[in-house]
Image (spheres, rainbow, N blue to C red):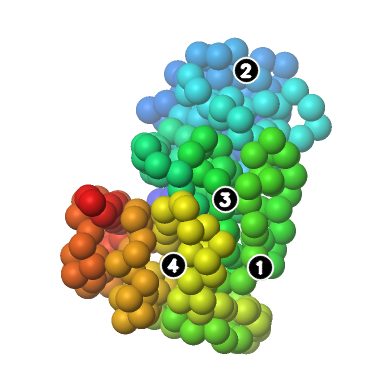
Amino acid sequence: MKKLIKAINLFYFFLKFKSYRIAHFLAKDSFPLERVQEISVKEGKIVINKTGQAFAIEQIAPCRFSFDLLLDIAQHDKVKIDNTGKEVYITWEQVKIRANSFENYYVASELFIEGLYSLHYNKNLVVCDVGMNVGVASLYFANMGNVQKVYSFEPFKETYDAAVDNFKLNPAISHKIVPYNLGAGGSTSELVIPISNVDSATKSTTDFFLERIDTDTAHTITVQIRDIREVVQEIFSKHPAEELFLKLDCEGAEYEILEKLHESGLLAKIKVIIIEWHFKGYQSLEKLLSANGFSSVVFPRPTKAISDMGMIYAFKMQ
């Protein structure tokens, strides 16, 4: 049935755009028919009708599995896709990132359009970014005037390198960022884990998470983890005058991290925490936050891959 639908769509796109190459590209990767009026074709390129911006197929290939994402970003008033040179970039305010992967588009949409970390806080902050991924969140935080420093942790080398590449594009703000090719977790350790056959935003070091995603158990990688208690205590020592904002988007490690911070008494010293939870619900996390004086707001954000996930926004009111 899927093959038949794609064949019908191929015929439809060919009749509409008179280009077999573009019709094949759109049909093969399921361009949403309900949004077809938002594009046109000119001189072998796909044109976003609202802006008039034209893209070669190769330039938008990273979004071939999610054309909705591309259309939303390309038509947003405050987010720009710069494809005038050999490479393509996404820009928002002072932040510039490469548009060479689906992950970069996806995280750009979360932060720049959805405002996932749109935090308005009137005191000076230092940020601990656990789950740096490709570095977009770290740049987002560094772009905030009241953020003095961002300490960012990413255990996967390829993802870490992609983040560093994005940092190099932003010298005006990336000097605030201290990146570590380490994970942060419940203890300092060296982990041997199976290779994950998923995008960088879904890679994990936690057993229960790895059991639920596509992995290559015949091949492994070794990652380094640093105890979150050491990380937080060191930040407190370096920044006695600033308040700490902890961001946890670490694919399952959030449960162990919060538990260890609670046991050590460090959780009560943090002022702001934003957590993305995965698979195991938010209740245990919210209970720990409440026990340490936080007020919190919970937003479920289920996806096709993970039905039990969402965001917790927690603040100390005093």
Q: Is mark 4 on a helix, strand or loop?
A: loop
Of the numbered discs 1 and 3, the one sitting upstream in the chain is 3
> What amino acid type is highlighted by mark number 2?
Gln
Which residue is labeled 3 in the image?
A: 149
**How far is mark 1 from mark 4, CA to CA?**
16 Å
* Rendering coords of residue 141 (x, y %): 51, 44
| Amino acid type, mark 1 | Asn
Q: In this view, does 239 lie above or below 111?
A: below
Q: How far apart are marks 1 and 3 (CA)?
A: 17 Å
Mark nearer the viewer, 3 or 2: 3
Q: Residues within 10 Å of mark 2 (few under 14, many from 20)?
A: some
Q: Are marks 2 and 1 in contact (CB under 8 Å)?
A: no
Residue 273: quadrant of the picture? bottom left
Q: Considering the numbered disc 3 on the image, is that residue within a helix, a strand or a loop?
A: strand
From the image, tell me which residue sits under label 4: 251
Q: Which callout, 4 or 3, points at the residue further toward the start of the chain?
A: 3
Judged by depth in the image, the label closer to the viewer, 1 or 3, is 3
Please say if 104 is above or below 8.
below
Judging by the rendered image, the residue that carries numbered circle 2 is: 53
Mark 4: amino acid: Glu
For marks 1 and 4, the one nearer the N-term is: 1
